[in-house]
Image (cartoon, rainbow, N blue to C red):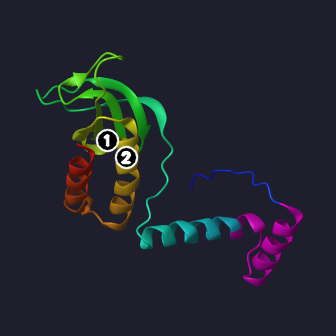
Amino acid sequence: MKVATFTVRASVAQSATWKRAQEAEGFASCGAWLARAADAYLRLRLKAGMPLPLAWRHGRFRVTLEDGSEPEVRGWVAPPFGFYHGTPDGPIPWGCTKHYSFVYLPRKRLVATFKHARECRMLGAELAAVYARSDGEGDARAGPLVDRYQRETT
């Protein structure tokens, strides 16, 4: 198993509280307890229907365009989603009318096109929760959500 390391800053009062909780729950380290607490927090967010936070970064990815071609485009990526400045026909030059195309990366499938990048980010956050709770049926549950976003943003 690959492991990531994090550094967490806490006040003296927080540190004392966390250490008491760690000892009371039988964890060997405060870090192990914090990891379990963070996982529980994210599960509660999902259960409450709150979107998962996504970390968007600049990147390149492939997308299947309307003409069937699969070019590599530059855009923003937060797996399993990405979006680029362009239409279903492909990327468009900066400064042109704003269009951002949202893509489901595992299938290179264009999902929707919006006028603003923030709409792609918001849809990605909501779809992340849908796919996380779906047990393989995310595509069926995502359709109504995408339709709602397209109606509300036009």
Rendering coords of residue 44 (x, y %): 50, 72
Q: Which residues are magenta?
A: 11-33
Q: Badges 1 and 2: C-beta atoms under 8 Å apart?
A: yes
At 31% from the left and 24% from the top, the residue drawn is 72
Kindly report the distance in space between the C-alpha atoms of the residues bearing marks 1 and 2.
5 Å
Judged from the image, the secondary structure of the residue bearing numbered disc 1 is helix
Rendering coords of residue 36 (x, y %): 62, 70
Q: Which residue is mark 1?
A: 105
Q: Quadrant of residue 109?
A: top left
Left or right: where 7 falls relative to 140: right
State which quarter of the image contains the N terminus.
bottom right
Residue 127, placed above or below residue 13: above
At 44% from the left and 64% from the top, the residue drawn is 50
Q: Quadrant of residue 134?
A: bottom left
Residue 41, placed above or below residue 154: below
**How many circles with numbers are drawn on the protein?**
2
At 25% from the left and 57% from the top, the residue drawn is 145
Q: How many neighbours does mark 2 have within 10 angstroms: few (below 14), some (14-19), or many (20 or more)? A: some
Q: Which residue is mark 2?
A: 80
Left or right: where 120 falls relative to 112: right
Rendering coords of residue 135 (x, y %): 31, 67
Residue 76, placed above or below residue 28: above
